[in-house]
Image (tube, rainbow, N blue to C red):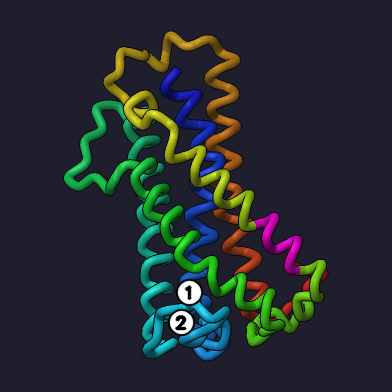
């Protein structure tokens, strides 16, 4: 059913969008840190990209922020279509499934930086000073697992039929069984709570709070 599918996707998409926005902002707050993990020309004997690391960092930051915001706005637009009577939008962001593909491409594109950190022991991300540097090598194994989970979520969201999440597909919200309405509401709440938790953690992080309090 459309609303239930929307609730499941919102629970994934809203925190994921917040994650990419926060990650993009970090690229602008700590550009030198991220520039340090850009593989130089000739890394591994095959790396073909040269040029300014700063440009790559800022470009990546912009892409993360734009993609994250687009994902959040797209989800809110779909939710408004179900929750607001006769809702019409003057401008609609790209569908979530398309934005998920955009973010998936980004995640794959920046993976050489993560690999470079592992193969060359690079640890220039000073904002990790609170939780501590990534321990070698087990910390990188955990990081790769986290990346795999992120890629899996993006692939799952990209594979959801977005038209079934939007109003006008013949599904009347008032006719759904109460259990489906309840599950949908809870999933949307979980997504919104994910945004709140990311924002709260980011504010504490930038305020210099200990890792145990984040």
Residue 171 located within the stretch drawn in magenta: no
Residue depicted at 37% across the width and 89% down the height = 51
Q: Residue furthest left?
A: 90
State how many labels appear: 2
Vertically, is 190 above or below 140? above
Write the start and end of the magenta stretch as one range: 140-146
Front one among 213 and 37: 37
Residue 155 position in % (x across, y down): 49, 42
Residue depicted at 55% across the width and 74% down the height = 113
Q: Are marks 1 and 2 in contact (CB under 8 Å)?
A: yes
Would you name the residue on which mark 1 appears?
25
Residue depicted at 40% across the width and 80% down the height = 49
Q: Whole-Å distance between the Cαs marked 1 and 2?
A: 5 Å
Vertically, is 160 above or below 125? above
Residue 85 position in % (x across, y down): 30, 27
Tell me the tag on residue 28.
2
Residue 199 position in % (x across, y down): 57, 63
């Amino acid at each position: 059913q459309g609303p239930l599918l929307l609730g499941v996707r919102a629970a994934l998409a809203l925190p994921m969008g917040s994650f990419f926005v926060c990650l993009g902002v970090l690229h602008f707050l700590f550009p030198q840190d991220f520039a340090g993990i850009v593989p130089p020309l000739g890394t591994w004997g095959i790396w073909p990209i040269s040029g300014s690391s700063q440009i790559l960092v800022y470009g990546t930051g912009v892409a993360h922020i734009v993609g994250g915001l687009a994902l959040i706005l797209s989800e809110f637009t779909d939710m408004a279509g179900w929750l607001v009577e006769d809702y019409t939008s003057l401008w609609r962001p790209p569908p979530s499934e398309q934005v998920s593909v955009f973010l998936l491409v980004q995640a794959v594109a920046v993976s050489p930086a993560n690999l470079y950190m592992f193969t060359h022991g690079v640890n220039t991300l000073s904002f990790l000073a609170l939780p501590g540097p990534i321990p070698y090598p087990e910390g990188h194994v955990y990081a790769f697992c986290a990346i795999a989970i992120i890629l899996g979520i993006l692939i799952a969201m990209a594979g959801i039929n977005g038209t079934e999440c939007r109003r006008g597909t013949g599904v009347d919200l008032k006719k759904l069984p109460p259990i489906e309405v309840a599950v949908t509401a809870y999933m949307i709440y979980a997504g919104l709570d994910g945004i709140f938790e990311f924002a709260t953690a980011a504010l504490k992080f930038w305020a210099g709070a200990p890792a145990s309090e984040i």
